[in-house]
Image (tube, rainbow, N blue to C red):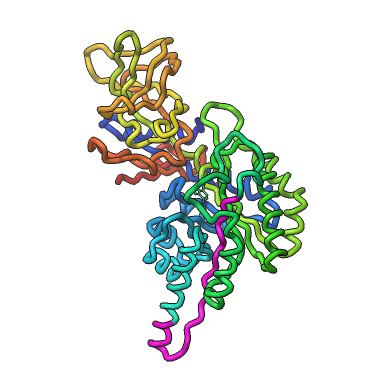
Amino acid sequence: MRTRVQKALDAIQHESHEPICAYIYDLRGIQEQVRGMLHTMPVHTHLFYAIKANPDPHIIETLLPLVKGFEVASIGELLKVRAVSREVPILFGGPGKKESELRLAIKHNVSYIHAESLLELRRIIAIVNEREEQGRGRSGEEQKSEVRVLLRINLRSNTLPQTKIVMGGGPSPFGIDEEEVEDAIELIRVEGAGKVQLCGFHFHSLSNNMDARLHAEMIELYLQKVEHWQQQYHLQVKVVNAGGGFGVTYDGSPGFDWSLFTALLQQSEAGQRFAGRGGELFFESGRLLVADHGYYAAEVIDIKRSHGQMFVIIRGGTHHHRLPASWGHNHPFQIVNTDRWKHEFIRPELRGERAHIVGELCTPKDRMHSDAEIEQLSVGDLIVFEKSGAYAWTISHHDFLGHPHPAFHYLTEDDEHVNANATFQSAHR
Ligand SMILES: *Cc1c(COP(=O)(O)O)cnc(C)c1O
């Protein structure tokens, strides 16, 4: 754990008389990491942040000066980004977009809409028609504004590289089947002329992928596909959005090798041809940007033995951090031993034993880690779950059982020369 996180934990302990339950987001860690990532990216590539991984406004603000823009998948997410910046480029994706969402997205000037079906394209065209009608009625002259779209394509499975990982290329509610590309282009040409501008394509077929070579191979293939469509349909493709899905490991094994990936992109032949034609390659990453910079700290409330197995019960659990339950994994953690004990009676402890770390909910599913090997742990100590910056708080059922929400702390300052109290700003929700 980083020194600044430890210092923040000291300060939190000092401040809190109630058992501790808090998220700590290391905003500076996020900045450092993203700067490092940008450093190795080829010039024709751009990084967007997919805010569904963690839509915390402080994180959006932190990333604003670094990333090219943000990917959102609902009007709620869109407004969160617009609350931070009125101009920053937004990519608007997601299946099942409502007409009201599309209208608002156009009004809020999103850069590109990821069109996910032919019906959605028709809806967009109808909305543009409606705007033109209204514009004409109001000002007497026609309002011209083309809506820029990227077609999200679900490729045929036999065109994607072989892998064990679940990916697109199978039946899915996302995107337009490769077989329908021609219909979509035709629809835009005929009914959408002057209203919808086809600027390129969007793919997102891998999730939490650890294999940088596979990822680069897949992008080579996307670009070959696009090149083929470009020739076949005489298109001008400005943008290819190659999605996110760069992985993070939770078991200590090596994660996604970004520098290898970007080196391979640099060498990619299809990539060079695409760049030569003035094409821009987008990535919209969520997990990789923020996962490692979030910490969820929860105080140990009880330790007990049940039918020969040890249970550690924390102030918090899967209602704040559903990732381990959702994925069925053991979430990595560290223990911070404390002197948070004020009673005369015996302070329960564990030494050199295995235990299950569970939450405060009345359900056996509320488990953060099974069979953890624990050197030394007492009631009142803290369990600090690492890698809790992505898909943790935001995917959780916060109000199930009505326990108070965690506190949120944000680290912005330097490791050194700052007293503990100044290393974080707090916010309670
Ligand atoms: C979820 C999602 C992302 C981000 O995925 P990560 O695995 O967090 O990088 C990007 N694009 C689309 C379309 C998504 O659905």
Q: Give the percent coordinates (x, y) of residue 406.
A: 32, 38
Q: Nearer the viewer, residue 313 or 278?
A: 278
Q: Give the percent coordinates (x, y) of residue 232.
A: 70, 64
Q: Residue sitting at 73 percent across and 45 percent down?
A: 264
Residue 418 in the image: above or below residue 107: above
Please check the rendered image and state whether residue 138 is part of the magenta-colored stretch, yes or no. yes
Residue 255 in the image: above or below residue 61: above
Q: Residue sitting at 61 percent across and 63 percent down?
A: 182
Res. 274 visible in picture: yes
Res. 32 visible in picture: no
Q: Which residues are magenta?
A: 133-155
Q: Nearer the viewer, residue 325 or 314?
A: 325
Q: Residue sitting at 65 percent across and 65 percent down?
A: 238
Q: Residue furthest top?
A: 308
- Tell me if 221 is positioned left or right of 368 in this view: right
- Tell me if 193 is positioned left or right of 143 in this view: right
Q: Nearer the viewer, residue 199 or 69?
A: 199
Please check the rendered image and state whether residue 77 is part of the magenta-colored stretch, yes or no. no
Q: Nearer the viewer, residue 415 or 279?
A: 279
Residue 247 in the image: above or below residue 366: below
Q: Residue sitting at 50 percent across and 39 percent down?
A: 291
Q: Give the percent coordinates (x, y) of residue 146.
A: 53, 75
Residue 65 in the image: above or below residue 251: below
- Occupied quadrant, residue 103: bottom left
Q: Give the percent coordinates (x, y) of residue 203.
A: 58, 52
- Occupied quadrant, residue 25: top left
